[in-house]
Amino acid sequence: MLKGERLTNIGTHFRFCAMGIVACSLVACGRTETNEQQAQAMDRFEQAWELQEQAVSGVIYERDRIKSDEEGNILLGETIEEYRQEKQALAAEKAQQISGTGLPGGQLAAKNLLLAQSQASKGRKLARDASLAWTEQADLHTRLINSASGIALSAHTAEQYGKLDFREQIASAREALEEQTRQEQELVATVGKGESRVKELEGKLQDLTTASRQKAGESEELARKAFTAKGQAQYDLYVRSAEASNEADALTAQADNIRLQLNLGRSGLRVDRIRLEGVQGRVESLAQALKSLQNRSADTQKLAREAGTRAQSLAEEQFQPGFEELTGGYREQVVAQFDEAIETMGQALESAEAAASSAPPESRNDLQLHAIGLRLALGTIVRQRLLAETGYRDLLKALHGSLSQLRPALAESIAQAFAASEERLAAIAGQGEELLGKALEDLGPLTEGQGPQQRLPLRYLAQTYQTLAAVTGKDQYRSLAEQTTQRIGQLGRQESP
């Protein structure tokens, strides 16, 4: 015997109720239909109920139906779920085959109750599968958030590096370099002129010095000759010696003037050369600074391009496929299954309400409670749907927040999905409030009074308020749920001896 999931209190309670209705209806058959029709109806009821008993028992009756993996390990959960749904579907099929003219109310109620149970089981499984599909996407959610964060970081890095082009610094350095280069060229020309002038003055000084020495020597030679000469010849030699001496002095004076000019020229040339060396040093430093700025600009622009490429790669190779997987998977595995679950549970509710309306008076209250229980189960599915949609919406909001300023194209796709999710949320909340509002109406007459028979309706009422609070977010329903729970407690104390 392979044990399955635990039966719910509601399912157990109304399974016995349905058994009683079936028994009563089969007795009634003899009064309303032929023996053949009676036998056929009894047979199908028995087959349908046996199939449903197998479905809810948690037991696999056919050993060959048990699944196992490649290593021989029994896949119990998968086996039981498929087995249960198959048996429920067969039970519903058998129940649909129960027909006949003037089908008694008891039989009709039993038939509809069997249908309701099968449909509800299918609806609950669809809701479980939808919720499971949503939770199984957790790894994908994490990958998407990480991808979005990586894209945002890379895009932000690219944007910031893109701003660091050093354009102003490069322009300033280039302007300073051009100015210093101009000064360098001017000083090179000035130093060249100074060197030429010094060289010229040095040549003149050399010539004047040589000429002055020659005249001085000539004057000394004439004076020696005059010392040994007599008369007029001596006088003429002294005159010529004096003239040569004067010429030598004049040449020396010119040489002294040239020497002064030369000293001044050399001093100015030294200053110009020092200035030129300073300017050349600044030109070299500015050239290196300009090259460094240009290199840094090239490096930062390269980093900007690399970061931009990385952001694009993350967007195309990771985020975009993951986002398509998210939206497609959510639409096909979560939304579609929840929609089918709500539709199927709605059919179960219609069948249960039909069973209650046609049931014998002694069973009607129980079946009304059963229908209300299914309505609450439907409300619970709507709540699960709402929780999944809220999580999906919040995930989209987080992704959009990461990418809205940096990757507008991606953000636009996310925004569209977010808007669709918001619309679904509003529709789900409205659907849930309308559905549970009807449950409140149905429960009203059943909760009047203070007897023990009000305990179950009150529990349903508390559950309805709690679900309404979750679906609508309104505090008034939470307060009403607490008040109803207190009332249940008071009933319990009154029943205590």
Image (spheres, grey):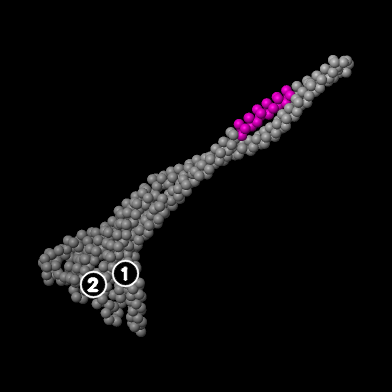
Q: Position of residue 234 (x, y in %)?
A: 86, 17
Q: Quadrant of the N terminus?
A: bottom left
Q: Is residue 177 left or right of residue 449?
A: right
* Label 2: which secondary element: helix
On the question of residue 303 being in view, the answer is no
The segment highlighted magenta reads 187-208
Give the residue type at disc 2.
Gln
How far apart, in angstroms, are the residues tagged by discs 2 and 1? 20 Å
| Residue pointed to by mark 1 | 468
Q: Position of residue 335 (x, y in %)?
A: 30, 57
Nearer the N terminus, badge 2 or badge 1? Answer: 2
Closest to the observer, 10 or 305: 305
* Label 1: which secondary element: helix
Q: Position of residue 159 (x, y in %)?
A: 45, 48
Closest to the observer, 488 or 436: 436
Query: Label for residue 368?
Result: 2
